[in-house]
C-alpha cells in the first residue's frame, strides 16, 4: 500500500490512501519525471520519464543518491545532467510522501529548457529593441536639432529677403522638424517605460496632477484650458511614470479641442481598483478608432502645429499595464472623449 500525503497549513499531515497499481498507472504515464527518495536522498522509485531525463535505466538509478539536496515544499529550478545529451533545466516541486512505511520525499521535475530558451531570447530581443530605439533616437536628434535651429536662424536673418512661398516653406520646415523632434523624444521615452519602474507606496495623485499641470503650463496658458477634478486617491505607483501618463492624457485633450478646453477628472472605486476618468470637450473619435488610439503612431490630427507624436496614449497603455491596470477610450464625435483608467489600490507582487 502506498500513501501520498501533503501538508495543509496549520494542520497535521493528512493521509489519503491509494492503491499501488493506481499510483504506478498515474506516475508511469506522466510526462514529468517523478522521483521518490528517502530523507538522505537515496532514490527509492523513478518513473519512465525520469529514466529518459536522467539518461539511465531504472535499475541503475534505484539505490543511488539523487545528487541534489531537497526539502519538503521546495519549488526550484535545477540543471539536470545527462550522460549523452546537453543538460536540461527542470522545475522541481517537492512534497512529503510515505513510501513502504517510511517518510520520503517525492520530487516532480518538469523540463522547461525550451521555455527558458524562449524567455532568454525574448528578453534579448526586448533589450535589442530598446537599445535600437535609444541609438536611433540619439543619432536622429542631433541632425534634427541642427536643422530646426538653422531654419530658425534663416527666418530671423533673411525673412525680409524671402518671397511669400519661400517664407512659407521655411516655416513649414521648422514646424515639421519640431514635430519630428517631439516624435523622437516620445519614441525614446516609450522604449524606456518599465526599465526603471520604482514603485512607491501611498502616492498622492493630487500631487501627481499638480506636477503634470506644472509641466504643461505653456500649453494650458495658450489654450486657456479649464480643469475640474474630484479628490484624487493615494495608490502604489511609479511617481514619474504616473506624472508622464497624466501629462500625455491632458496634453492630448488640449491638442484635440476646437473650443476652449474643459477637462474634468472624475473618481470612483470598483472593488480593489480606482477608476479615474478624464473627460474632455474635444473633437471626439469614431468608435472604430477607439482601440487604435493606444497603438503607436495612430493619432488624430491636432488643430495646429502642436500635432502629437502618436505615441502618447500608447505610452499610457504601457504604463497602466505595468501597474496591473487597464485603460480604454469612449468618445462621441463633436462632443468629446473620456479616457478611463482602472488602477489597483495596492500593487500585487
Image (spheres, rainbow, N blue to C red):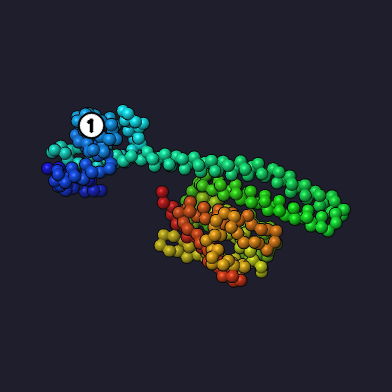
Query: Quick one: SS at disc 1?
Result: loop
Q: Quickly name the residue at label 1.
A: 57
Image quadrant occupied by the N terminus: top left
Relative to 69, is 223 on the left or the right?
right
Q: Nearer the viewer, residue 112 or 179?
A: 112
Q: Is residue 45 visible?
A: yes
Query: Is 286 above or below relative to 27?
Result: below
Residue placed most toward the observer, 172 or 67: 172
Q: Residue at x 43, y 54 (%)?
A: 346
Question: Would you place residue 144 above or below residue 247 in this image?
Answer: above
Question: Which residue lies most toward the bottom here?
Answer: 335
Tell me where residue 290 sits by quadrant.
bottom right
Instruction: Locate residue 327 relative to residue 69 in the image: left or right.
Output: right
Q: Nearer the viewer, residue 55 or 218?
A: 55
Can you give x and y, in whole percent of width and height, for residue 111 in the image? 33, 39
Residue pictured at 72% horizontal, 55% vertical = 175
Q: How many marks?
A: 1
Residue for point 32% across, 29% down: 84
Task: Judge the density around disc 1: few (<14), some (14-19), many (≥20) Cα neighbours within 10 Å.
Answer: few
Image x and y of residue 287, in percent: 54, 67
Q: Position of residue 22 (x, y in %)?
A: 16, 46
Residue 273, how many percent across, how many down?
44, 60
Question: Could you say which is closer to the camera, residue 311 or residue 7?
Answer: 311
Q: Residue 252 sits in which quadrant?
A: bottom right
Residue that extends furthest to the right in the rendered view of this protein: 161
Q: Is residue 155 above or below residue 262?
A: above
> In screen coordinates, is 226 left or right of 345?
right
Q: Residue at x 38, y 40 (%)?
A: 114
Q: In the rendered image, is residue 203 in sight?
A: no
Amino acid at each position: 500500500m502506498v500513501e501520498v500525503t501533503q501538508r495543509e497549513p496549520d494542520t497535521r499531515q493528512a493521509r489519503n490512501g491509494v492503491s499501488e497499481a493506481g499510483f504506478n498507472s498515474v506516475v508511469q504515464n506522466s510526462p514529468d519525471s517523478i522521483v521518490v527518495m528517502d530523507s538522505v536522498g537515496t532514490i527509492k522509485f523513478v518513473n519512465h520519464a525520469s529514466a529518459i531525463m536522467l539518461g539511465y535505466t531504472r535499475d541503475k538509478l534505484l539505490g543511488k543518491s539523487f545528487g541534489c539536496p531537497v526539502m519538503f515544499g521546495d519549488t526550484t529550478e535545477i540543471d539536470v545532467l545527462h550522460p549523452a545529451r546537453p543538460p536540461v533545466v527542470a522545475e522541481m516541486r517537492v512534497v512529503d510522501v510515505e513510501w513502504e512505511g517510511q517518510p520520503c520525499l517525492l520530487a516532480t521535475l518538469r523540463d522547461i529548457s525550451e521555455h527558458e530558451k524562449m524567455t532568454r531570447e525574448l528578453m534579448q530581443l526586448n533589450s535589442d529593441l530598446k537599445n535600437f530605439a535609444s541609438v536611433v533616437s540619439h543619432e536622429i536628434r542631433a541632425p534634427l536639432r541642427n536643422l530646426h535651429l538653422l531654419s530658425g536662424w534663416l527666418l530671423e536673418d533673411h525673412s525680409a529677403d524671402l518671397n511669400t512661398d519661400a517664407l512659407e516653406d521655411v516655416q513649414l520646415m521648422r514646424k515639421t522638424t519640431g514635430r519630428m523632434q517631439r516624435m523622437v523624444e516620445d519614441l525614446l521615452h516609450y522604449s524606456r517605460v518599465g526599465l526603471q519602474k520604482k514603485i512607491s507606496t501611498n502616492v498622492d495623485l493630487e500631487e501627481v496632477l499638480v506636477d503634470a499641470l506644472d509641466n504643461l503650463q505653456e500649453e494650458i496658458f495658450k489654450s486657456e484650458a479649464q480643469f475640474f477634478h474630484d479628490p484624487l486617491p493615494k495608490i502604489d505607483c511609479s511617481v514619474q511614470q504616473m506624472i508622464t501618463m497624466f501629462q500625455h492624457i491632458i496634453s492630448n485633450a488640449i491638442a484635440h479641442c476646437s473650443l476652449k478646453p474643459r477637462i474634468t477628472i472624475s473618481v470612483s472605486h470598483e472593488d480593489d481598483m480606482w477608476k479615474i476618468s478624464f473627460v474632455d470637450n474635444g473633437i471626439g473619435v469614431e468608435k472604430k478608432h477607439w482601440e487604435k488610439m493606444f497603438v503607436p503612431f495612430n493619432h488624430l490630427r491636432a488643430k495646429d502645429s502642436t500635432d502629437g507624436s502618436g505615441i502618447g496614449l500608447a505610452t499610457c497603455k504601457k504604463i497602466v499595464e505595468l501597474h496591473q491596470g487597464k485603460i480604454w477610450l469612449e468618445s462621441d464625435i463633436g462632443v468629446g472623449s473620456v479616457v478611463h483608467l482602472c488602477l489597483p489600490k495596492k500593487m500585487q507582487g
